[in-house]
Image (tube, helix red, strand yellow):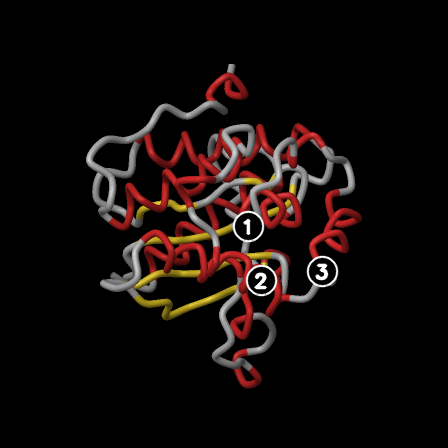
Amino acid sequence: MKILLAGEGANELGGWAGHENYRGNEPGVIEALLRKVCPNGWKITHAVQWKDITKFKVGAFKTNLQQNVKGLHLLAEENGLDAVAFLSDRDNKEYREKDIEGAIALIEENNESGPGIIGGMAVERIEAWILALSGKTKSEEMRHPEKKLGNLGIKNKNTAQFVAVVEKADLESIPKDAKSLHVWLGRARTVLGTNQETPANPLDDLLI
């Protein structure tokens, strides 16, 4: 399985961030999470930063975020890839999550044979996921989760330390209140073939 990776920067993408001539082999949080879910049977072959995605500005995809998701999915399809894995921060803006979930729903309605989607919003940002992976509860209620990382000896924006937390984490012990993380992991399990059943999505009410 060949995967297209997309994220906002080095924390999400690791060595895949930046210009292709300067990419390294260091994993980011997305790759580390994928490997926790399924350690083999797939590889990352393409990557793009969120800001560089070519938007799809036709049809039902009305907002910039929705156009980004559709553009990303088309990029994967055009390159013959099997899946796209992405992550973006909600940043205390609920409409961002609603737009992303709406775009994923629209694509999946008519995507019987196209690339699978492993994506979603980190609430409120990726640092909350790191806290949840460390076993901390109520991470998604924190408006500034990055301020709590120091209590765990983790430096903010330190990709290597973020990845180390992911690698040590027990996915079965993640607090249930880390809903956006559980949704993302559920999609990863479904696309990578480690789920027997697709779990209920606790974010479905965002689409109403």
Q: Which residue is mark 2?
A: 49
Q: Depth check: 163 or 21 in front? A: 163
**Amino acid type indicated by mark 3:** Gly
Answer left or right for 30 relative to 95: left
Q: Which residue is mark 3?
A: 153
Pick whichever of labels 2 and 1 is earlier in the sequence. 2
Pick whichever of labels 3 and 2 is earlier in the sequence. 2
Q: Which residue is mark 1?
A: 55
Mark 3 burial class by Cα count in 10 Å: few <14, some 14-19, many 20+:
few
Secondary element at image label 3? loop
When the figure is inspected, residue 14 is found, relative to residue 33, above or below; the finding is: below
Q: Position of residue 113 (x, y in %)?
A: 21, 44
Q: Depth check: 199 or 115 in front? A: 199
Q: Position of residue 206 (x, y in %)?
A: 54, 21
Residue at 63 percent of width and 49 percent of height? 126
Quarter assignment of residue 52 = bottom right
Answer left or right for 58 relative to 144: left
Front position among marks 3 and 1: 3
In the image, which disc is placed on residue 20? none
Asked whether the residues under the numbered discs 3 and 2 touch, taking CB atoms below 8 Å apart as contact, a structural biologist would say: no
Asked whether the residues under the numbered discs 2 and 1 touch, taking CB atoms below 8 Å apart as contact, a structural biologist would say: no
Residue at 65 percent of width and 36 percent of height? 139
**Amino acid type indicated by mark 2:** Gln
Distance between mark 2 and mark 1 Cα atoms: 13 Å
Secondary element at image label 1? loop
Mark 2 burial class by Cα count in 10 Å: few <14, some 14-19, many 20+:
some
Q: Position of residue 4 (x, y in %)?
A: 40, 61
Front position among marks 2 and 1: 2
Q: Quadrant of the N terminus?
A: bottom left
